[in-house]
Image (cartoon, rainbow, N blue to C red):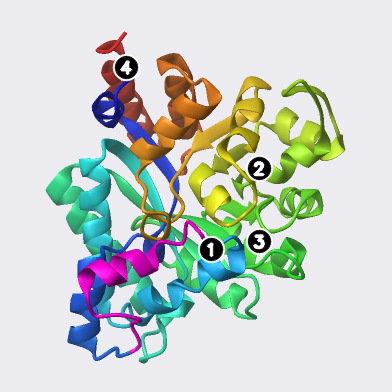
């Protein structure tokens, strides 16, 4: 299928970081408006090139670029604009439902509190949904390396009826197990939020096991689950204890292939376990992670699956429907989105 054909397919996006998806032009304009003077360049072409982290080779280096996107997201006005533009960009890529995530504590350098930052994110998302017809929900992140996860969870639950649907643990996995933040996760769930946890990206199978034990309904990335699978000829032969648990519980994997390559997790497209996990029957979904740093769209991730892992239209429909099934929104929204997806795929079959 051509890139234009893939772009026309209805898509569902569950794993996209707000601070990883800014437009370079917006970064420049917000830096000027807010007085942020730390950008590596004030030339649009040079800044765009600098933000591309496709050659970073490690998660740590990849994440360095966030210093500058977060740096210009320190006012309510800036946050709202970024959220609005994210919805517009995703709608233009054929996304028909999305959950965008962000850590409000990262927006506090100029005095915003967590609740104010969350409110600004929601304001931009609601305006975007109204303008572009894209149902958009917010997942609130707590940073694993910080000690304020309980406070973040409490702030998130204040907005459980206003568009916040989930709570996430982001940041470095190694040395910061999910169990350290069990109280925060419990607060979030008790407050009506769903739980997704980054695991199996920066750390391996023990991180996934810890996320599962902490109650994760979805795993952010989760690709290192393949390390608990016996593989022969590129196909799964038997599952280890953790992999079997993920399979049996139907825990969704929020897979972000391009990001995994850019952080050096896999050496090339063929070695990425996307196709293996999908063929083995895991609940695989396709996601963008950070559209600015990887300079990709969800259409690009669809193309990756087609060109490198032999996905056809039916495979793309399967992962899209799995994304709907595991979305954190209400059932009425799921039903509306599912109808759009089914109609969109019927038109190409």
Of residue 274 and residue 151, the one placed in the foreground of this image is 274
* Residue 186, numbered circle: 3
Front position among marks 1 and 4: 1
Q: Is residue 45 magenta-colored?
A: yes
Between discs 1 and 2, the one toward the N terminus: 1
Between discs 4 and 2, the one toward the N terminus: 2
Mark 4 nearby-residue class (10 Å; few <14, some 14–19, many ≥20) = some
Between discs 3 and 4, the one toward the N terminus: 3
Where residue 187 sits, quadrant-wise, is bottom right
Mark 3 nearby-residue class (10 Å; few <14, some 14–19, many ≥20) = some
Is disc 2 placed on a helix, strand or loop? helix
Between discs 3 and 2, the one toward the N terminus: 3
Marks 3 and 2, how far apart in space?
Answer: 25 Å
View extreme (left): residue:
131
Marks 3 and 2 in Cβ contact (< 8 Å): no
Marks 1 and 4, how far apart in space?
Answer: 36 Å
Is disc 1 placed on a helix, strand or loop? loop
Which residue is disc 4 drawn over? Answer: 345
- Percent x, y of residue 218: 60, 44
Mark 1 nearby-residue class (10 Å; few <14, some 14–19, many ≥20) = some
Whether 25 is drawn above or below 211: the answer is below
Which residue is disc 1 drawn over? Answer: 56
- Percent x, y of residue 254: 55, 43
Mark 2 nearby-residue class (10 Å; few <14, some 14–19, many ≥20) = many
- Percent x, y of residue 253: 60, 39
Which residue is disc 2 drawn over? Answer: 223
Whether 325 is drawn above or below 136: the answer is above
What residue sits 58% from the left and 57% below the top?
263
Between discs 1 and 3, the one toward the N terminus: 1
């Amino acid at each position: 299928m051509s890139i234009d054909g893939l772009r026309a397919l209805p898509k569902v996006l569950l794993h996209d970081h707000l601070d990883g998806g800014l437009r370079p032009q917006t970064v420049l304009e917000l830096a000027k408006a807010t007085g942020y003077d730390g950008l590596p360049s004030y030339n649009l072409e040079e800044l765009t090139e600098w933000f591309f982290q496709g050659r970073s080779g490690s998660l740590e280096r990849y994440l360095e670029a966030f210093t500058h996107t977060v740096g210009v997201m320190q006012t309510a006005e800036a946050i709202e604009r970024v959220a609005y533009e994210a919805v517009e960009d995703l709608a233009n890529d054929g996304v028909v439902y999305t959950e965008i995530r962000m850590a409000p504590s990262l927006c506090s350098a100029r005095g915003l509190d967590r609740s104010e930052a969350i409110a600004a994110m929601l304001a931009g998302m609601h305006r975007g949904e109204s303008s572009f017809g894209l149902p958009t929900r917010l997942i609130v992140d707590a940073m694993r390396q910080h000690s304020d996860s309980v406070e973040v969870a409490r702030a998130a639950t204040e907005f459980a009826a206003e568009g916040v649907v989930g709570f996430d643990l982001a940041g470095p996995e190694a040395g910061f197990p999910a169990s350290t933040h069990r109280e925060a996760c419990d607060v979030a769930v008790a407050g009506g939020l769903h739980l997704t946890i980054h695991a199996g990206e920066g750390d391996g199978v023990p991180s996934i096991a810890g996320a599962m034990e902490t109650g994760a309904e979805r795993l952010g990335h989760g690709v290192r689950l393949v390390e608990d699978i016996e593989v022969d000829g590129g196909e799964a032969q038997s599952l280890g204890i953790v992999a079997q648990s993920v399979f049996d519980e139907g825990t969704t994997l929020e897979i972000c292939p391009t990001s995994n390559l850019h952080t050096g997790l896999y050496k090339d497209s063929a070695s990425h376990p996307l196709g293996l996990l999908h063929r083995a029957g895991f609940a695989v979904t396709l996601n963008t992670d950070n559209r600015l740093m990887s300079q990709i769209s969800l259409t690009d991730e669809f193309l990756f699956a087609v060109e490198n892992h032999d996905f056809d239209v039916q495979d793309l429909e399967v992962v899209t429907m799995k994304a709907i099934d595991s979305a954190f929104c209400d059932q009425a929204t799921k039903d509306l989105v599912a109808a759009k997806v089914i109609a969109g795929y019927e038109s190409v079959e």
